[in-house]
Image (cartoon, helix red, strand yellow):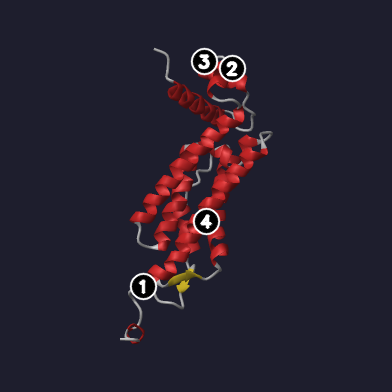
Amino acid sequence: MPPRNSQRRQQILEALAQMLEASPGNRITTAGLAKQVGVSEAALYRHFPSKSKMFEGLIEFIEETLFSRVSIIISEEPTAAKRCEKMLMLLLAFAERNPGITRILTGDALAGETERLHQRVAQLFDRYETQLRQVLRDAEMREGLRPVAPLPVAANLLMSAAEGRISQYVRSGFKRPPTADWGVQWSVLMDGFFRDAVSQPIGKQPASYASQGT
């Protein structure tokens, strides 16, 4: 029995990811991809109208994987520091486990492709940074803490550290795992990262404040 459409689409995306990993620096052609999957180029286009749509399929996979897990992290972890730590480790570990797809995140695999794909990846990183910024903003209300730097600057610092590790991973030909020594670097990043906020977290106002108006 031939594969269903959804199964064939998945096979095509997996083959594309494998080729991106096996041929760093090389541009993927539809002819090569069709050969890898074991179908004709015409068969590829029955499932994806263009190679750009194939890349978009992989970007959608990245988004769904990362942001579904981010929601779980935020619901499970009580502190901003731990939330940020796990969110960035998630990003680094995902990159490490999916080297071919990581070439899309760094733009290496998108050379010569449509600008829309580059913008889609940029939006993914912007969304991730926005999530970090929201976590840091919530820390003031929940924990009475705020970053020593302005919120956008602090969130960008954390995001830049992770993106730098991912870029090094691709640039090294996948020889420098992005999670290696990350724990040490994270400790350095967090040293002096937070300070007491002016406002107190909900439920922890001083007694004199809490008694006003009673």
Residue annotated with mark 2: 41
Q: Position of residue 122 (x, y in %)?
A: 60, 47
Q: Position of residue 40 (x, y in %)?
A: 56, 14
Disc 3 crowd rating (10 Å Cα; few below 14, some 14-19, many 20+) is few
Q: Is 51 situated left or right of 18 in this image?
A: right
Q: Residue at x 43, y 23 (%)?
A: 7
Mark 2 or 3: in front is: 2
Mark seen at residue 130 = 4
Residue type at mark 2 is Glu
Mark seen at residue 38 = 3
Q: Position of residue 58 (x, y in %)?
A: 52, 34
Dot 1 or dot 2: first in sequence order is 2
Dot 1 or dot 4: first in sequence order is 4
Q: Residue at x 51, y 24 (%)?
A: 12
Mark 1 or 3: in front is: 1
Image marks 3 and 4: residues in contact by CB distance under 8 Å: no
